[in-house]
Amino acid sequence: MLVHGTRKTAWLVVMVVLLSAVMPLAADEFQDAVEQAKAAYDEGRFTEALEHYTVALEIDDSIAELFYNRGNVHYDLGNYRDAVEDYTAALELDDGIGQAYYNRGNARFMLEEYREAIEDYDEALAREGDDEMTFYNRATGHFRLENYREAIADYRRVLEINPDHINAHYNLGLAHVRLAEQLENAADE
């Protein structure tokens, strides 16, 4: 007759044996899902990539890069809210992925969440250093919020990095015009 403690021990032995048989299968399934997701993404099959990344995350949701990659897939599919959620999950696991701040900023921009996008661009710049596209996107966010002085400063920064950036030249001029209109309207009130 087994005593209570011995039943627990027997149960643990059974669980260990079962888990050791299942773990290699899960590891193989995980690796296959990740490899298939990457291949599908590289070939532009985004819906398929999304399915495979989701399978991989169901097996192991502790890997920031998987959330980051699935966030990229969501972004490419136009699922910007889902992209924000995945980039956020990636950053909660590893806040050192500076590109995740930039990409989350882009997704928030597409959702017209300009203030939040600007915060993400700020963080990306703090972590990744001067980047032409991050300054440009942040400038455009400021422009959309009618923060023309900030937009002007960022468009100028873009042009310091790349003097040939045509859109930055155009938007800088437009921001100057809008700032002048804004100041004129404020003086009339």
Image (cartoon, grey):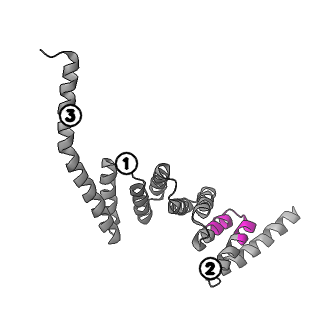
Relative side of 188 to 124, left or right: right
Between marks 3 and 1 in the image, the one whose residue lies nearer the viewer: 3
Amino acid carrying mark 1 in the image = Asp
For numbered disc 1, what is the local secondary structure? Answer: loop
Amino acid carrying mark 3 in the image = Met
Residue that badge 3 annotates: 15
For numbered disc 2, what is the local secondary structure? Answer: helix
Residue that badge 2 annotates: 167
50 or 94: nearer the viewer: 94
In the rendered structure, which disc, 3 or 2, sits on the residue that comes first in sequence?
A: 3
Relative side of 172 to 99, left or right: right
In the rendered structure, which disc, 1 or 2, sits on the residue that comes first in sequence?
A: 1
The answer for how far apart the CA atoms under marks 3 and 1 are is 22 Å
Mark number displayed over residue 61 = 1
Inspect the magenta stretch and tell me whether residue 150 lies in it.
yes
The answer for how far apart the CA atoms under marks 1 and 2 are is 40 Å
Inspect the magenta stretch and tell me whether residue 142 lies in it.
yes
For numbered disc 3, what is the local secondary structure? Answer: helix
Between marks 1 and 2 in the image, the one whose residue lies nearer the viewer: 1
Relative side of 107 to 29, left or right: right
Q: Mark 3 Cα within 10 Å, few/some/many (few <14, many 20+)?
A: few
Relative image position of residue 97 (x, y in whole percent): 50, 59
Cβ atoms at labels 3 and 1 below 8 Å apart:
no
Relative image position of residue 74 (x, y in whole percent): 42, 60
Q: Residue furthest bottom?
A: 164
- Quarter of the figure with residue 73: bottom left
